[in-house]
Image (cartoon, rainbow, N blue to C red):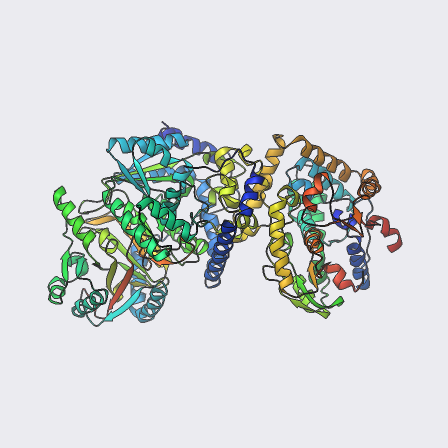
Amino acid sequence: MVTCLGDMFFPEVGVSVTRLLRRLGVTVDFPLGQTCCGQPLFNSGYHAGATRVAARTVEVFRDAEHVVVPSGSCAYMVRHEYPALLRDTPARAEAERLAGQTYELSQFLVRVLGKTRFKASVSGRVTYHDSCHLLRGLHESEAPRILLKNLEGAELVELPGGDECCGFGGSFSVRLPEVSSQILDKKIRNIEATGAACVVACDSGCLMQMGGGLGRRRSKVRPLHLAELLAGDER
Amino acid sequence: MTTRTEFLSRIRTEVGKTPGLFSARTAPRPSDPRAVSETIKRELAERWPQALERFQLEFERVAGVFHRAASIAVVPQVVAGIARENEVRRLVAWDAPELGADLLDALTARGLEPFAMPPGDLADATERAELRRRVADAELGLTGVDLAIAETGTLVLRSGAGRPRSTSLLPACHIAVFDRTALIETLGQAGVFLELWNRGELEGRIGAVTSFITGPSRTADIELTLTRGVHGPKEVHAIFVDQVIRG
Amino acid sequence: MSETDLSVPFRRRAGSALGDKHLQEALTIATTKFIGLRRDAFDEFPEGERLRDLAREIKEATLQHLDRYVEQLIDSVERLGGHVHYATTPEEARRVVLDIAARTGARMAVKSKSMASEEIHLNEALEAAGVIPIETDLGEYIIQLAHERPSHIIAPAIHKTKGQVADLFAKELKRQVAADPEELTRIARVELRQKFLEADLGITGANFAVADTGTVVLVTNEGNGRMVTSLPRVHVAIMGVEKVVPSMTDLMVFLQILAKSATGQKLSVYTTLVRGPRRPGELEGPDEFHLVLLDNGRIRQIAGPLREALYCLRCGACLNVCPVYRQIGGHAYGYTYPGPIGILLTAMLEGPGSVKDLAHASSLCGACVDACPVRIDIPKMLVELRREIDEARIAPWTERLAYGLMEKVLASPTLYRWSKPLARLLQRPFARDGRIRSVPLAFTEWTRTRDLPALAPQTFHERWPTLK
């Protein structure tokens, strides 16, 4: 599952995931016609619409053995919200199956495949931002850190306030843009204070927010998805 | 105005509409609080030195001042010392039976101006007003202790005849005297005593209030700067008496 | 009392707060401090997690039989000679208190901190009836002098500098006052001591009420709770009906985690258990004790979507960790209860329409759930409120249209596929080197302070054939 943001704005993340998994011997397929997990609709309260989009997504992934998604928030949506959301629809059983088969990327690498050592695509210091849904929704703070600490060629530096929200929150970023920006200011100050060359995250939403702020400031710090860091691809 | 029946009936209706969010139970209660409390006391009779050590640590952490006296006879000396340091003399104390000893003469002999809160009901409003004025004027308040909780450095005081609430509240300096029989270890154990004390109706001369006191009055409401003695005492002293007071 | 002007849109109120330098500094310092204190307290307390689970369970178990426990509480209080009153609305609650004040000839009432009394706007009603209400919690006293509402559930004057406080005291006392917290505290002690001794009526809230024994529990640090319940002749406690706990054993579970969550203290300085009016033999204590049980939207939520919000202990931990609260403070929210739980409580008290903007004052980050001693799932209920708002069609038609369009595109692979060349066309005037620096309409808000990535030259869908 490449995610809507990934498909449209960060296809290199999907490319990295594909290369990474294939190098580990995994057969990777990409069901065409996937669009979005429906979270933007769900989070804003448009549940009828979210249900329709979710039902489609469930259908698209009907034959998948494992579904890997480079996004904590999308993985959370499928694993934790799909069963309840689709409970009163014909897609109910399939939704529950899909929920059990869907993994965020770092969790898949570390906890399913048991692979922890990779070569970094950039050298030097990297710092890591804990995406809210991965950290608190999926209770995962370890898997990304295991991967980052075992990275050949790069050194992990802990981000002060790394577990604090970046201010994205989907539509929040445009409904309350001043508050979202001020939250982002704090995040960027913390990032720059680490002296890291890159800030890594497992969620394209966060990377869009942080990258948007870093770019506007013409900062030297580069936002990078974990997949890109691990795949050894240069952009 | 809403009546009891209407109010309860509305709650009942809403409760009946839902099984709730998940299977849940309240905390298991001791079926015989008296027996459990006696067990606690028996165990503490062995472990009291460790409990005391912990109590002192926690009490001092919350800015309590800890003293130790060999016997109740030494207490007036300790109290006088505290009074001298603060340059004060007027002291209000619990009635002697509540403290476990009559210390007024010894305190007077050491230059203090003590008086004890009388037991019983004073029907006379003038007397009540006079007493209130004297209490408000007092600079030191001397009380006993019902429980001393080691885990948190907390003093538990029950109000009642001869042991009014103001003694540990109005004077700027509160001095509490206790011995090993008051020591318990945890808040959980305190709960057992609360179950015991509040079983059925309140008996005898026991009052309506139980106060858990953990250090002197404080606030951080102004710029998060910690200050003490907002409304309650600025200082809390605990005098541990080695020799059990009520022999 | 000056209220936040609700006619000013929330976004603008938030904007003012962001521009207030004093407030920003105060918020950063206070919330950071509280976060640290809470974390240290729980780091030192290994049983903490188990007790939080137990506390949550007790709250749920109590709600499942709330009628039984409330009835037990009433009987317990009445057996001790106390009086219980039932207030469905704020109006009724105010009337109960005013009637008691009138009947007992009260001219001045001292109040210990009570969010419930704020909720029902009691002070204005007392003043109008000629009863002077005096807030005695230092923070509440300060904001009373300033004619403001509290900006934080447990630290009401956190937005005020010591200079501002000194000015307030100077105006009230008509003399010079140093901007020194020690001195200011000493002044408050002396001024309020007189009030405690003279007041006819003491008004408190209740952190808990124990059904088994009829005991009202007050958790304070200053001692005003003890004063207010011991010195005046009459004591009135106003309490939301959900605050009842079944037994003393249950109470101890909450006491072990409440202060730690709020301020990092093992226990607050004073935990005061008040079991009715003064007993025979007691020199002090009120002759009359009244408990006012408050509904104000709570009872309807027992079977409603905001049921879990009834677990709330009013500790304020969620405020301290909320990225939104930390930036805008309490007043911008505009209602009695701010912060994450405040949005839910406002919806409970005033209806979902009241939070059509506030329900979106959250990035759904979940920090609040982590901090909440009883693990209330606030984000889940915020999403539920957003759903209710959508169902009620309160959002602007432009927004509903946009989401309707989004749904159509995402539900149809064909439309989704066609949307990309369309997007590329539309973005052409704005995209340079893969970035969009400014764009009109919906995403203007984004691009004011952030770059937006342009649509990728090739989407992943379009690249897949080469990767296969």
Q: Is residue B25 left or right of residue C8?
A: left
Residue C187 visible? The answer is: yes
Q: Residue furthest right?
A: C466
Q: Is residue A233 left or right of residue A168?
A: right
Q: Residue furthest bottom?
A: B70
Q: Residue furthest top?
A: B1
Q: Can you say which quadrant of the picture contains the N terminus of chain C? A: top left
Q: Is residue A199 above or below residue C301?
A: below
Q: Is residue A14 above or below residue C378?
A: below
Q: How many marks?
A: 0
Query: Where in the figure is residue A6, as x and y percent of width and height?
Result: 76, 50
Query: Where in the figure is residue C116, as x and y percent of width and height?
Result: 40, 40
Q: Can you say which quadrant of the picture contains the C terminus of chain C? A: bottom right
Query: Where in the figure is residue C401, as x and y percent of width and height?
Result: 71, 32
Query: Where in the figure is residue A157, as x and y percent of width and height?
Result: 64, 67
Please state which of residues C164 and C270 is positioned toward the viewer in this rendering: C164
Please state which of residues C72 and A31 is positioned toward the viewer in this rendering: A31
Q: Where is residue C378, by image quadrant?
A: top right
Q: Is residue B65 left or right of residue A224?
A: left
Q: Residue at x 59, y 39 (%)?
A: C384
Residue C273 visible? The answer is: no
Q: Where is residue C394, by image quadrant?
A: top right
